[in-house]
Image: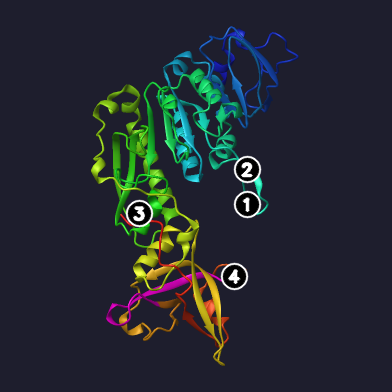
Amino acid sequence: MTTKELRKLPADIYDSDPVRSRLGRTASFQKRLWLEEATISGSPPELKRAVFHGRKSVRWGSTQQVRVGRLRERSARVTTFVRCMSEESSSSRKSLVFLGTPDVAADVLDVLLEASQDRNSLFQVAAVVTQPPSTRGRGRKLLPSAVEQRALDKGFPSDRIFSPQKAGEEPFLEELKDLKPDLCVTAAYGNILPTKFLNIPRCGTVNVHPSLLPLYRGAAPVQRAIQDGVKVSGVTIAYTVRALDAGPIIAAEKYEVDPNITAPELLRTLFKKGSDLLLREMPFVLDGTAKEKAQEQDHSKATLAPKVTVEESWLNFDEPAEILHNKVRAFAEWPGTRARFLLCSSSGETQSIELKVVTTLVNSLSAESLPSGGEVSLVRDALVVPCGREGADCTYLEIVKLQPPAKKVMSARDFCNGLRGQKLLKDSKGAPLSSVYMAA
């Protein structure tokens, strides 16, 4: 809309009190303007949608006093201000509520918010639901979830961000009902949704799940898939039902897994693909055709992906190198992987040392360069550890990066340079073989 068109807007959108309002017909939209308090009278009651100005929101009502932030020269904020005057665009859009908690879920929220800005968008994000603030970091400060922080950074109104302890709390459900959502979208929300919740949205609740359902249902699908060494994974858009990740499948997309990719990297990739897949399916979800065509899961093929525990973080060199490599990749972000070694001095004295194993490889060295016997050796830039059975069945784990106690992450070569003639031996006695998780 041009400046001339802006000046021709009806007079009733301006405050009758020129002292309180600095937006008038003669105002130049080429300069910085301040809108401090403006009473919008005569606006249709349907125009009760949020418009974002930095971190502050404007809600338009029939006669409602609002507070607006700074408006700069003919920016996107002016365009948004004018667009909110369109009754047609507001009334035709479906109301969507997003539920998520970690960084990868915040990325999904970004995609939805950006898509909702399009003038032809079929939906608008009416509310964001996330887990309550938690204490974390070195200072153990109480911090909001990544989704809540991202929503605030995007200028989403704080009174439309909900963080109930449980999604079944009656006060929260009442507020959700008042929003009259057409659709709820979940992505790594981390909270059980009761039947009372699932009955609220008209079009149901859909979930972005980073696995090819019915495989890897549960809290840690990517970690468990990498731990199992899968070569193909994917992402699924499915309806949410009371049973865990067991709803009808709307769409799914496969993804080839690189043998050295870590869980955080794969998780972000799958949620990005899931966001795009969700947008492609959104028209069919909103008009109801997706529910008619959704495929029921084959529950006989279902596998579970339970939460990872700290007790699983130990590496035992009696296991094959490939299993240990997959474990390092799977637990890269949390809880990490640890291993015990023995430092042997020239006098024969030994000392146990615990190292955090950060990055590993397998099968990258030629047979001629591999060390003989059970001694740990530095080959090229990797600390090579014999694993599994001795002899022909022996495999080798190549530790590229590690972290000694109370030190920063370093290369294997830098670590070996600091040994000052001491030999490094593997120590499997203190590392348990047992694991809470049983591979699928």
Residue 76 visible at all: yes
Q: Residue furthest bottom?
A: 347
Q: Amino acid at mark 1?
A: Gly
User: Between marks 4 and 2, how big is the CA–CA gap?
Assistant: 28 Å
* CB under 8 Å between discs 4 and 2: no
Residue that badge 3 annotates: 225
Q: Residue at x 54, y 72 (%)?
A: 354
Mark 2 element type: strand
- Indicate the position of residue 180 as horizontal and vertical percent values: 46, 19
**Alpha carbons under labels 2 and 3: distance apart:** 30 Å
In percent of width and height, residue 277 lies at: 34, 38
Q: Determine which of the numbered discs, if any, sits on residue 143 in the image.
A: 2
In the image, 145: left or right of 435? right
Under mark 2, the amino acid is Leu
- Element assignment for label 4: loop
Magenta part of the chain: 386-404
**Residue, disc 4:** 405
Q: Is residue 232 left or right of residue 379?
A: left
Disc 1 target residue: 137
N-term-proximal mark, 2 vs 3: 2
Asked if the residue under mark 2 is in contact with the one under mark 1, i.e. CB atoms within 8 Å, the reply is yes
